[in-house]
Image: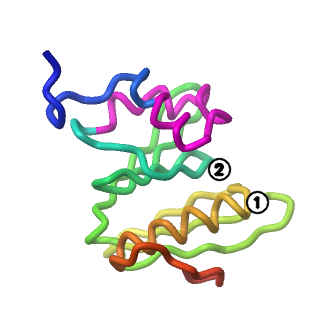
């Protein structure tokens, strides 16, 4: 019998969450396949952004995971209460950049499509400042 909140989600459960978010386009990405090893029991994916790696907003924290040469080599986890801000920087052909500011860490994810970056930034900003929905469309969400 599975006890909710205690067991880590399986890859199938994670893929179902991603499909509910309408992000089937990233199901085959290496970092997604590693999420069963990264997510905690009871963690639910709320928003995703893909660029050089992935940013995953869950009900508990923000996760940045990046792989290169077939190996997951970067995993950063940020508690929402430790995030001071997120910033959206529009880009040209190479895509936008999301910057996550915490004390003392700054994390970047680059080559994110502009619309995806803006939506992700707005979502996380709403979470960290406690509002239902952020309407910000400026560079600093």
Q: In the displayed structure, does residue 65 sit left or right of residue 105?
A: right
Please say whether residue 38 is one of the residues in the magenta stretch.
Answer: yes
Q: In the displayed structure, does residue 89 sit left or right of residue 104?
A: right
- Estimate how packed mark 1 is, as few (under 14), some (14 to 19) or many (20 or more) residues with alpha carbons within 10 Å: some
Q: Quadrant of residue 104?
A: bottom left
> Total of numbered circles in the picture?
2
Q: Provide residue 108's location: percent of width, then percent of height.
A: 54, 62
Q: Provide residue 22's location: percent of width, then percent of height.
A: 61, 41
Q: Provide residue 70's location: percent of width, then percent of height.
A: 57, 25
Tag 2 secondary structure: strand
Q: Which of 127/39 is in front?
A: 127
Q: Which of 3/101 is in front?
A: 3
Say if mark 2 contacts mark 1, CB within 8 Å.
Answer: yes
Q: Which of 28/107 is in front?
A: 28
Q: Quadrant of residue 2?
A: top left
Residue 75 sits above or below residue 123 on the image:
above
- Check the image and name the residue furthest to the top: 1
Q: Provide residue 134's location: percent of width, then percent of height.
A: 51, 77
Q: Which residues are magenta?
A: 15-39
Which residue: 17% across, 37% down? 5
Tag 1 secondary structure: loop
Color style of the picture: rainbow
Residue beneath label 2, please?
51
- Check the image and name the residue furthest to the right: 93
Residue beneath label 1, please?
95
Q: Which of 71/59 is in front?
A: 59
Q: In the displayed structure, does residue 132 sit left or right of residue 122?
A: left
Which residue: 73% across, 64% down? 114
- Position of the C terminus by quadrant: bottom right
Q: In the displayed structure, does residue 95 sit left or right of residue 42?
A: right
Which residue: 31% across, 75% down? 103
Which residue: 71% across, 64% down? 96
């Amino acid at each position: 019998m599975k006890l909710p909140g205690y067991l880590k989600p399986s890859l199938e459960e994670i893929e179902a969450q991603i499909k509910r978010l309408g992000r089937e386009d990233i199901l085959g990405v290496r970092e997604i396949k590693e999420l069963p090893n990264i997510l905690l029991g009871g963690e639910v994916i709320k928003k995703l952004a893909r660029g050089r790696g992935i940013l995953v907003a869950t009900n508990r924290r923000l996760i940045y995971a990046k792989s290169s040469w077939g190996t997951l080599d970067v995993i950063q986890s940020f508690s929402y209460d430790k995030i001071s801000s997120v910033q959206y920087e529009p880009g040209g052909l190479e895509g936008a950049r999301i910057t996550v500011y915490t004390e003392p860490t700054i994390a970047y994810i680059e080559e994110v499509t502009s619309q995806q970056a803006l939506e992700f930034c707005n979502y996380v900003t709403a979470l960290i400042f406690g509002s239902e929905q952020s309407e910000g469309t400026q560079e600093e969400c």
